[in-house]
Amino acid sequence: MKNISKHFYLIEMIVNQTHVTYFIIKGISEAPELQVPIFLLVLIIYIITLCGNMTIFVLVCLDHHLHTPMYFFLANLSIVNMSSSTVTLHRILVNFITQDNTVGILALMMQCYFFGSLSGIELFILTAMGFDRYVAICKPLNYQMVMNFRTCSVLASFCWLLGFLQVIPYPILIANISCYSSNEINHFCCDIAPIIEIACSDVSVLNTLTFIQGIIMFTITPFCLTLISYLFIIIAILKMRSNSGRRKAFYTCSSHLTVIVLLYLTLILQYPIPSNGLGPTKFFSLFSVAIVPMLNPFLYSLRNKDMKSAFRKRV
């Protein structure tokens, strides 16, 4: 009966060309026995992400020793991590508590917008952090002059504005999709790719925009800029004569470089792989939106003397 009703729904949508009023988020897995473990795991990840990133943000704001460009961008990254986790993971938690996995078209467009914009902002801020490390290692004598408060503020503002502005066309184009082959979204949150998969009207403009902005502007461009920064950093480190200087320079970049590798690796592996059920795409997507934001506070604080010192003062 369930399959028959799906076929009738498909026929009705194709014939009448009507707008869908709601969608069904299939979630991470549809297996009943996995719902409670998934809920508990996501809840723990969400709480750790919020607590860890909020701790970093508060410490950076309160401790004047942390009022440096590196920690300024780290505080911005913490805000992005908390926001992106709330936008994506709350859907899994709400669906389990309410036992209602439906979402309206307006809520779908809003989540797509904030999910896309926050993902872009995260990559832009990481790029700015790479530039900061480049100046600190390659131009140490000019660091204070180049990375002053005005420069940091302009870079951070540019990251936020560019992230929010570039995603504006997406909800508009989604609202203009007239026909869907199904109202079930095979994902745990509202993303552009699974929506395009179920659209049966012309989405060529949306596909082109996704390629230009989602891949070129939001992924390849930040990656290339970060790569260029690290190429200069590696050259500068290799030119250092003392081993202690090399270790210190590499140590200052290790946390940022680890986050960069984890995030871009999951992005590379995420999209080319077809998703079926709890497939690789869902796994890598969950890793990028949940695990990486959770790991950031640990990567930036556990091996950071300034952060640990600031934490001990406030405890």
Image (tube, rainbow, N blue to C red):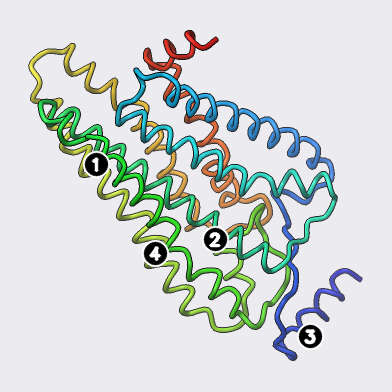
User: Which amino acid type corresponds to the residue marked 2 in the rendered image?
Assistant: Tyr
Q: CA distance from mark 3 to mark 1?
A: 56 Å
Q: CA distance from mark 1 to mark 2?
A: 28 Å
Residue 304 tag number: none
| Residue at (80% x, 79% y) in the render | 9
Q: Earlier in the sequence, mark 2 or mark 4?
A: 2
Q: Is disc 1 in contact with disc 2, using a CB cutoff of under 8 Å?
A: no
Check disc 4: other Cα within 10 Å, few if <14, some if 14-19, many if 20+. Answer: some
Q: Position of residue 64 (x, y in %)?
A: 36, 19
Check disc 1: other Cα within 10 Å, few if <14, some if 14-19, many if 20+. Answer: few
Q: Which of these two is toward me, 256 or 28?
A: 256
Residue 12 tag number: 3
Give above or below for 94 relative to 195. Answer: above
| Residue at (24% x, 39% y) in the render | 131
Q: Which residue is disc 4 drawn over?
A: 213
Q: Is disc 2 in contact with disc 3, using a CB cutoff of under 8 Å?
A: no
